[in-house]
Image (tube, helix red, strand yellow):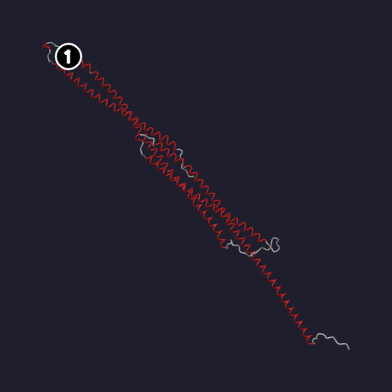
Amino acid sequence: MAKLLQTAPKFLGPEWHISNKNQYNSAEAQRSRSERLVAESQRLVDEIEKSTQRTQSDVNKKIEQRLDEIKFWKKELDDKLDQLLKETEALFTFKTRLEKAIEKYQEPLYIIHKCIEYRDKRFGIDLVQDEVERELYKESEVLQGVLALLQRTLEETGEQLRLNRASRYNLEKDLEDKCVALTIEDFCSTLTNNNPDICYANNPVRIEPNSVSVDDWLEFSNMNVEKADQQRNNSLALEALIDRILSQTANDLRKQFEAVNQAFQTQIKETKEAKEKLTTHLTKIMEEIAAQEKNVRTLSKAIQDKEGPAKVAHTRLESRRHRPNVELCRDSVQYRLIREVQEITCNVGRLKDTLAQAEIELKGLYRRQLSLQEEIQVKENSLYIDEVLCMQMRKSIQYYDF
């Protein structure tokens, strides 16, 4: 009998049954674990799907809310920008009114100074610091004060327009950013899971270093709106101020203008009255000169007329001195001739004294005539300056509300 080959040791029957049973149990456990995992996985998939859908829905709502917020602030900014632009345009109109007023008031100032210059060419007693001169200087001071006030207001208006432009820039820049943000948010709101534009981004959850908080975002736009409102209100207040200034200064200038004209009219009236009185006195002086010249001629003739009687009396006395002897008698004729000569001599002396006095008076009348004529020329010169030169120029002055 051949030698049997040695084989591996064999298991016992119970071991075989135990091994099979272990295999069954392991397979069942593995299957059970797998089933639980499949069930858990499905539950997890369903849960995450629902969570993802809820999250995406919430994100969509928040994007819609964000869109509404951006649209709200965009409308606010649009409205404020429109209001500011209209107010800036109105303020620019007021600025033009100020510039026009300053330009137009240069001519009255020139006329006032020209009137003062003309009136300095008065001469004689009429070169006086009268009411007209005082009112003219006052009108010049008032007008220069008005021009200074208008210039300051014009500078304030220019500064306000600059502030309006700065606020306008901020509004327009904010609006530009809002439009870009609105476009981006609108694009985001249209994205779906099947959209061809979707893709993975590199580090999408990073926070940009220049990003701001929602409160900062709100504060920024709110500040722009408030500043725009402030500048608009400032512009409205400045416009009201400009309107009051233009109206009040025009009223003040008109009042002073009337005061100057009234002073001119009063002075012209007084000057004309003085000239008329001087002319009347000149007429009387001329008449008196004529009478005095006649008187001088009369006195001269009277003196000349006394030469005949004087010569007759002298000749008689001289002739009677030649009477002979006892005929050379101091008779009544002799005494009367002597008295006649004395009377004629005395009378001629009196006439000559009167003539000398008349000639002195006549010279005084001539001087008075010349003085009156010169004074009348002074008054005529003053009237020409006040009535013709000054008043004619002042007719072109107009103080009206610009």
- Residue sitting at the far front: 3
- Left or right side of 235 for 319: left
- Left or right side of 365 for 94: right
Q: Quadrant of residue 41?
A: bottom right
Circle 1 residues within 10 Å: few <14, some 14–19, many ≥20: few
Q: Secondary structure at mark 1?
A: helix
- Residue sitting at the far left: 326
| Residue on which the image places disc 1 | 318
- Residue sitting at the far bottom: 1
Q: Residue 197: give x, y in percent of width and height.
A: 69, 60
Q: In the figure, 353 relative to 204: above or below?
A: above
Q: Residue 26: give x, y in percent of width and height.
A: 75, 81
- Left or right side of 275 for 298: left
Q: Residue 188: give x, y in percent of width and height.
A: 65, 61
Q: Amino acid at mark 1?
A: Glu
In this orientation, which residue lies closer to the viewer: 351 or 220?
220
Q: Quadrant of residue 299?
A: top left
The answer to whether one can see residue 243 in this image is no
Q: Residue 381: give x, y in percent of width and height.
A: 38, 33
In this orientation, which residue lies closer to the viewer: 199 or 146?
199
Q: In the figure, 75 relative to 122: above or below?
A: below
- Left or right side of 316 for 61: right
Q: Residue at x 17, y 14 (%)?
A: 318
The answer to whether one can see residue 137 in this image is yes
Q: Quadrant of the N terminus?
A: bottom right
